[in-house]
Image: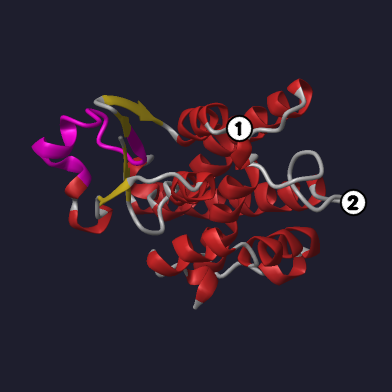
Amino acid sequence: MLTLYFSPGACSTASHIGIEETGVAYTERPILIAKGEQKTAEYAKVNPRGKVPALDVDGRVITENTAILSYLGRRFPESGLLPADPIDEAHCIGAMAWFSNTVHPSYQRYMRAERFAEGDAAIASVKEMGKKTFWANLEEIDALLTGRQWCVGDKFSAADAYAIVFYGWGLRAELPLATLANFTALKDRMLKRPKVMKVLQSEQSVLVK
């Protein structure tokens, strides 16, 4: 039995899309970050780090989008979450790792600057630099999509499920996403996928408002 713990609008949207794309039955367990539910003693039993997403697989828990999406892709290869070609698979996992360790943190520094500095001036500086860095990362995603429809290879993969999260975050930050033609085209292709739309609508994503 699969149970996905996620928070609407958080990075866990990537794993939410991924598990929907497999078509398998699973249980949804929303953890509302805005209400601090990730910090409860109950959730600490699922993920002691107090973060989403988390995927419970018959009592064994997997955390982090890259790990969850890789697991789902390998367990359900027909989903196409991981490319069949070994090099493309490595590129897909590499893209997800970069999203996790570089793109996501830059947005955190913009949205949660107080976690990285003390004092009004320092916090303002971290916030400003975070926004600039996040935008530069979005531009890099756009450049990587030059001449291709999907992040890796010629088909949808888990990397696309992850990338779309940052498009939504860019809209929240009021960045000029429409100027990123390649990334915008990827977003539009993703919105045509029924299971992607199902997740985005259920999470009330800014991408479908």
Estimate the x, y position of residue 99 in percent, counting from the top left. 58, 39
Q: Find residue 177 and report its image quarter.
A: bottom right
- Residue visible at 52% across and 74% down? 208
Residue 195, placed above or below residue 19: below
Residue 65 lies, with reference to residue 33, above or below; the image says: above
Answer yes or no: is residue 81 visible. no
- Please tell me in which quadrant of the rendered image residue 89 appears: top right
Give coordinates of residue 123: x percent, y percent: 39, 50
Mark nearer the viewer, 2 or 1: 1
Identify the residue under disc 2: 147
Residue shown at the point (40%, 52%) measured from the top left: 10
Outermost residue to the right: 147
- In percent of width and height, residue 209 lies at 49, 78
Mark 1 crowdedness (10 Å alpha carbons): few <14, some 14-19, many ≥20: some
Amino acid type assigned to the residue bearing label 2 in the image: Gly
Name the outermost residue toward the bottom: 209
Q: Amino acid at mark 1?
A: Pro
Q: Left or right? Give the position of 126 relative to 56.
A: right
> Is residue 182 visible from the viewing direction of this image?
yes
Q: Is residue 176 magenta?
A: no
- How far apart are the two marked residues, 2 and 1, measured between alpha carbons? 26 Å
Disc 1 designates what residue?
Answer: 77
User: Where residue 206 sits in the image (x, y, percent)?
Assistant: 48, 70
Query: Does residue 125 appear left or right of residue 32 in this picture?
Result: right
Among the two numbered marks 2 and 1 on one chain, the one whose residue lies closer to the N terminus: 1
Give the colour scheme shown.
Answer: secondary structure
Tell me if residue 7 comes above or below residue 86 in the rendering.
below
Q: Which residues are magenta?
A: 38-55
